[in-house]
Image (tube, helix red, strand yellow):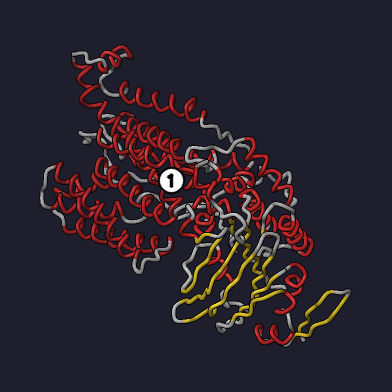
Amino acid sequence: MRRMRSPLAIATVLLPVAVAALFWALVAGDLPVAVDDVVAALAGGDGLSATVIRELRLPRAIAAFACGGLLATAGALMQVLLRNPLADPYILGISGGAAVAALGAITLGAATFWVDASAFVGALTAMVVVFGLAHGDGSWTQTRLLLTGVIVAAGCGAAVSLMLALAPDTRVMSMLFWMMGDASAAARPWPAVVVLVLALVVVMPFARDLNVLARGELTARALGVRVGHLRIALYVLASLLTATSVTLVGSVGFVGLIVPHLVRLVLGNDQRVLIPAAALAGGTLLTLADTAARTVMAPQQLPVGVLTALIGVPVFLFLLSRSKA
Amino acid sequence: MNAARRALPVDDAPLLEAERLALQVGERWLCCEFSLSLSAGECLVLLGPNGAGKTTLLHTLAGLREPSVGQVRIGGLPYAAWPALEAACFRGLLAQQQPDPFAAGVLETVLVGRHPHLGRWGWEGAEDVAIARRALAEVGLAGFEQRDVQTLSGGERQRVAIATLLTQAPRLFLLDEPLNHLDLHHQIAALDLFQRLVREDGAGRGSVLVLHDINLAARYADHIILLDGRGGVIAGDRDTVLRADLLSQAFGHPLRRIEHAGRAVFLPD
């Protein structure tokens, strides 16, 4: 099992690929633009193509990239926190809470801003409720946290189904769109970028502690890791990342589960490499998927979650079969 | 690395002391008040039936659990006075179970033991890798460096855990059933290895082992703590504790003491 584990791999492979994906997102679309136009638009030029690039394609590309990075990072953190390879950012009910609140806002006919705000509040409420219930007598094990989260998520799922069943037809379409995930309406992507960068700055000094925590709580404590504080910080951080992403583009599936595993297959499970690599790879995957979603069958837009799976599944299966050899 | 390390531990203090220690879990008292002191070069074995509280006592001695009564000190100072990372350089724990939820290389797993020795931004260097490789060689796993821990047998996985502890390089070894999954040859090899490390002149090391095999305890222990599972504690030198009547009572099964080639052997009736 030979793995290239150098942090250089991130800089030399993933970074250029990420930049290329973002560039493609700016070039591709109904309105053909040349490379010069993109450079001119980013430099602040005028004209139709510059406006399309700056006002439409750039915010959408940044939103997709930031959310991909947020979800992949949150997934990697959740997998360490729960020490469970099947954990993903939505497993503890964060997206469920956001969906209940967002669909509630849509039912009431709220404007986009208030739908987003409700989603964020709903996600944070789910986070507090799950933590409060799982914490119980103070001895929260990851099994208890996992069970509590899964049950809360199931309850939210039932509430969502109920709202869909009772909603008038005119609202159901926008509800479904919200739930499938959609970057087209993401008008304010920059806060998500700030959250992603801040999260990486906060988590990287503790990345080796996460390596130790992945070997079991008892061993980690004996090796001097302050497990109690670390687990609470991990839970809050992963939840905030997920809440930010869900608020911006809805619940895009698959990225948060598969990207950490994809990176792990190639680079190994050293969190110092895995976390930044997952952030870059997740951003790249979602940017590619979103660009494909709006161009492959244009003018029809496809759900981005379908494209992430269509791109990610073959790549994942290829890497998995290769790693066994 | 910082000023605290030079101040710790207190010179000439015993490696491990427990003063009027008593443990309670829920309503049940696992052991009544007792005291112990372990000096460099000594080996202490914890014996007792299933559920008697050996692991709980070991975790308390490792500072991972607050004692219900009394105090535990390592290097002359209570755990509260030790920064967690400094304590991890002084005492190391071999846990009873080694969870491996993710695939990981053997060398990578063993290198986790270097964690307390590295700074916040430190990466394992050539010296750390050399320490880890030596530890793997000590447990007979040289050549296993690139194997995935999830593909190892139970005994090999246990030896990886022992190598991780050696890589941590503490002065006080706290071993919870170190012989789990090991065949007879590797059981003796592991106990010989820790005995050699503890007896090494000037190294200042000591060990506390949870064992199930009374005869191996008789062979390697200097001191023994026998928990009877009803809150009773018998602590003392090996020969004062290892008596057929005390052991029979604690384990609830009659045992016979036999002298063979100058060694005491205990056989169940």
Q: Does residue A231 appear to the left or right of B248 in the view shown?
A: left
Residue lying furthest right: B261
Please give the name of the residue rendered at 28% of the width and 47% of the height, measured from the top-left corner: A243
In the image, A237 versus A118, the foreground residue is: A237
Q: Quadrant for the C terminus of chain B, please.
A: bottom right
Q: From what the image shows, is residue A33 above or below residue A324?
A: above
| Residue B2 seen in render | yes
In the image, A101 versus B149, the foreground residue is: B149
Pointer 1: what residue? A76
> Which residue type does callout 1 highlight?
Ala
| Residue A264 seen in render | no
Q: From what the image shows, is residue A197 above or below residue A80?
A: above
Residue A291, image quadrant: top left
Q: Secondary structure at mark 1?
A: helix
Residue A194 placed where, x, y %?
29, 35
Q: From what the image shows, is residue A9 above or below residue B171?
A: above
The chain letter for the residue carrying disc 1 is A
How would you rate the neighbour count of disc 1 (Cα within 10 Å): few for under 14, some for 14-19, many for 20 or more? many
Residue B32 placed where, x, y %?
53, 80
In the image, A186 versus A209, the foreground residue is: A209
